[in-house]
Structure formats: C-alpha cells, structure tokens
Image: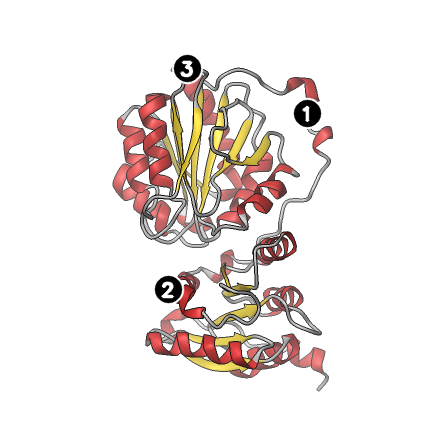
Amino acid sequence: MSFSERIESFPPHPSATTTPRQRVLVVDDSAFMRQLVREVITESGEFDVVGAARDGLDALRQVRELNPDLITLDIDMPGLDGLSTLERIMRECPRPVVMLSAGGSDGGADATLRALDLGAVDFVRKPSGAISLDLDAVREQLLQALRAAAAVDVARLGVAPVERRDRRQLEPAHSVPVGIPRFLVCVAASTGGPAALGQIIPALPRFPDAAVLIVQHMPPGFTASFAQRLHGVARMEVREAQEGDRLRPGHAYLAPGGWHLRVVGDPGGPMLRLDDGPTAWGVRPAADPLFTSAVALYGSACLGVVLTGMGRDGAAGLLEIRRAGGLGIVQDRASAVIPGMPDAALRAAGADEIAPLAAMAATITALVERLRNRGDR
C-alpha cells in the first residue's frame, strides 16, 4: 500500500465517551523539546502521551497507527512543516490540534494565525524560542490548551477562512464615519474565536454611529498581526487598541495581548485605556473589565456579544450590560467550537438573541439597529 493510500485509510476520530483519558501525540523536530512536552503532559496526570513524532511525515504515520485524541504540533519543522502537516490532518483525519509557536515575530505570528485559520484549536508560545529550556513557564497554558482541545466538538473544526478582498472595493473612502460613537458593540471570544471573528468582522457594515471593541484571549505578540488580518477583510477600520485611542464610529479595536482594555470618558470624547493589572478568570485581556467599563460610560447603549470559548469570561459583563438596559447576544452551542463561555453567559445573563455563527454578523447589525431605533444616547 502506498503512503498516500495509507493516509487515506486513517481511522475516524474516536468519540470522547470511549476514552476516559485523552491520548496525546507530541510532534516536534527537537528530541529535547519532545521530551519536555511529554513530561509536562504526563506529569499532569490528566492525559496519556501515546507517541512522539520528529517531523510532519512521522506525525502523519503515527496519527494513522496510534489514532490519538489530541495533538501538540510544532510549527517550524524541516520537510513537511507544521502548517502543511496541520492542513493534511484537518483534511484527512480531523482532530483537535494545539500548535507550539516558537515566537511572536511577524513571521511567527502570521504562521500561528494561519494555523488557527486551518483549524488548530489553540496555540502556546514557547517562552524562549524553538528550544525552550523554560517550558515550565507555560506549563499551565499548555495544559489549559489541551483541556480546551479535549472539550472541542470535532465537527466544528477546520472552518474555512474568509476570502481576502480589496477593502477599497467594499465601501467608498468618503463614507468613513467621523465624530463620537453613540453605541458600543463589545465582543468576547476565546478558543475558536479567531476563526469566528474571521467570519463575523468582514460581514459587519461600517457603522456610522457605533464602535466595536473586541477581547480575544491571546498572548502578547500576536494581536497586532491578528488585527491587521481582520483589517484586510473588513469594511470598517480594524486596529490593535493603543493607550489613549479616541473611539471613532466605524472602527473596531482589538485588545492587545497582555493588557486589559477599558473605555473611559474624557472631555475630548470616549477613549481607550490599557492596564496590565491582575488577570481575570486567568486571562489578560479579559472581556469582563471591558464590558463593565462600557456599561459605566454608555449604559443602555451597549451591545454585548459572547462567542465561543472555555470558561465564563464575559458572563458577568453581559449581565451588567443587560441590567443597564443594553442588549446581549450569545453564540449557539451548535456552531461554537467550545460552548463554555456562551453557555455561562446565557445562564448568568440571559440573552436577547442566541445566534449561530453564520448569522452572527446579521444579528449584531439588527441589534445595533434596535438600539438606534429606540433612541439611546
């Protein structure tokens, strides 16, 4: 049997209900890193490491032979690199994959974001490059990513990225809104969020009277590249938020990795503040500080949106928005890679709409129109 025929004969991913403890394949071209990752995972007592592959081809062979539940996959490998390996896995034998990224340089960040486009569940940045002796520094991040991967609905993986278009063809330049936003759209996302936002943001109009504020759980070094990618496909202006930015309608602001994002009042108009205070729900940026600050300034003129993710970030904030008279949307379970965050938000706050990913942009647009029609602010 040829190699290609063997690949085509990969067994289907097993149901989580048949495997009490998730089985992990570790893939890295460094024998030292393979051993370190294996030790971190094994010592947790939560997962079983069933194999370690030295490159992409070895990984594909072991996926077939061992049928692991989860995979940790290095991006930078000789021969068949991590992205090409991931693409093959997601096309031929989809299962949750956590990428290990060597750094946050432009090239490294772009490759990591491309991996999320291709269906990777999450990524962990190696703390000191390709050979990281200090992997203990991200031990909990790696385990948390694996826990999230273990909770993933495999059918939700591998969402195709939005086709890149020339932004100049979307709306004429003279239509860029000016002034102060009358409404705020606050968005919370975690695991599965980059792919979801890649569908939602390009489909939103350039609101003439609303600004969009986004918290995507993501570490430092990646959010600038992510904002640029969204900007390249969006009708509105998308940027990584900076300290002191003035809010403008028709603009979207992405919280930078490692910083909480808040909106505050100022004589010159609403502006953005960043702080590196304590994490909330174990993450920074977190959505709850943003949602709370938005309510304090805008009250009932807020729309909160909670997308896919593990945990409960955004639940308390959405409750505050709805108690103040604002509106709330949560993503439905069927379209969420991990429904933990929207489920928690729905339990805590309820929602004005529960929307599938495919209808999320239209739902956001409709609820902004509802705010507009009732005359808030």
Residue 44 at least partly seen: yes
Is 81 positioned to the left or the right of 315 in the image?
A: right
Crowd around label 1: few <14 · some 14–19 · many ≥20 (10 Å): few
Q: Position of residue 366 (x, y in %)?
A: 48, 26
Task: Say which label, 2 or 1, has the lower sequence index.
Answer: 2
Task: Say which label, 3 or 2, has the lower sequence index.
Answer: 2
Q: Is mark 2 in CB contact (under 8 Å) with mark 1?
A: no
Residue indicated by mark 2? 140
Residue indicated by mark 3? 267
Residue indicated by mark 1? 171
Q: Amino acid at mark 1?
A: Glu
Q: Amino acid at mark 2?
A: Glu
What's the distance in space between the residues labelled 3 and 2, CA to CA? Answer: 43 Å
Q: In this picture, is 75 found above or below 196?
A: below
Task: Say which label, 3 or 1, has the lower sequence index.
Answer: 1
Residue lying at 26% horizontally and 28% vertically, measured from the top left: 323
